[in-house]
Amino acid sequence: MLTAPPVVLALLVLAITAVAAVSDLRTGLIPNTLTFGALGVLFVAQLVFNGLQGGAIAALTGLLFASLIPLLLYIARGLGGGDLKLMAACGVGLGPLLGMEAQMIAFSVGCLYAVGKAIYSGMLWQTLRGTTFVLTNAITPLGKRRDLPESVTAPVRFAPFIFVGVLFTVLGHLT
């Protein structure tokens, strides 16, 4: 259960991810002013609500834990930089455990959406086949890699899924 100061932090993260989701849906971008500003504001808020040492530990471990998987996906070109920075901000504001929980929910909802979209468009088998190419291309020499189908490489605006992950996480810990 979230106590009073963490509720304030959670609501800040929720508001930031809501703004990011709207921006991502409208423009396909999450502004750096939002993500970097969020990182700074949430770091300071952690220090205010949890003290210098406790707040710094929560913010930095949250940043590390919530950034690791998105960073690997960013390097593999599977996630945008704005999404990476937004997940990092979530980790700073929510701390390591809730930040990871929000991230896992976001990825789960995103995967469900992608599968549903592939089924609806009649591209499920092509998408699954393309996904196997992604996995095998990772271990295949550069000259022998297969071209990926558009159903696998089409960009997904991920900030709305991050918002949903944060929303479910916050609601799950309020009761």
Image (cartoon, helix red, strand yellow):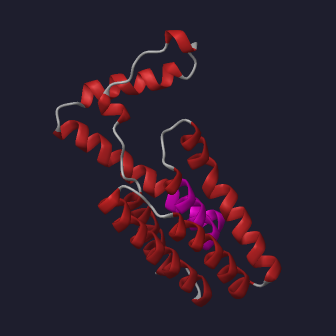
Query: Is residue 49 placed above or below 79 in the rendered structure?
Result: below
Horizontal arrangement in the rendering, residue 21 relative to residue 13 (left or right): left
Q: Residue at x 17, y 37 (%)?
A: 121
Magenta span includes 92: yes
Residue extending furthest top? 144
User: Where residue 24 sits: x, y (%)?
Assistant: 37, 60
Horizontal arrangement in the rendering, residue 31 relative to residue 149 (left or right): right
Question: Residue 128 is drawn in which quadrant?
Answer: top left
User: Where residue 164 sits: x, y (%)?
Assistant: 39, 64
Residues 68 and 170: in front is 68
Query: Is residue 11 placed above or below 152 in the rendered structure?
Result: below
Q: Quadrant of the N terminus?
A: bottom right
Range shown magenta: 84-103
Q: Residue at x 36, y 52 (%)?
A: 157
User: Where residue 94 sits: x, y (%)?
Assistant: 59, 71
Q: How many marks?
A: 0
Q: Residue at x 60, y 82 (%)?
A: 6
Magenta span includes 22: no
Residues 83 and 122: in front is 83
Give the prevailing secondary structure in the magenta stretch. helix
Question: Residue 119 is drawn in which quadrant?
Answer: top left
Q: Residue at x 78, y 77 (%)?
A: 54
Horizontal arrangement in the rendering, residue 26 relative to residue 64 (left or right): left
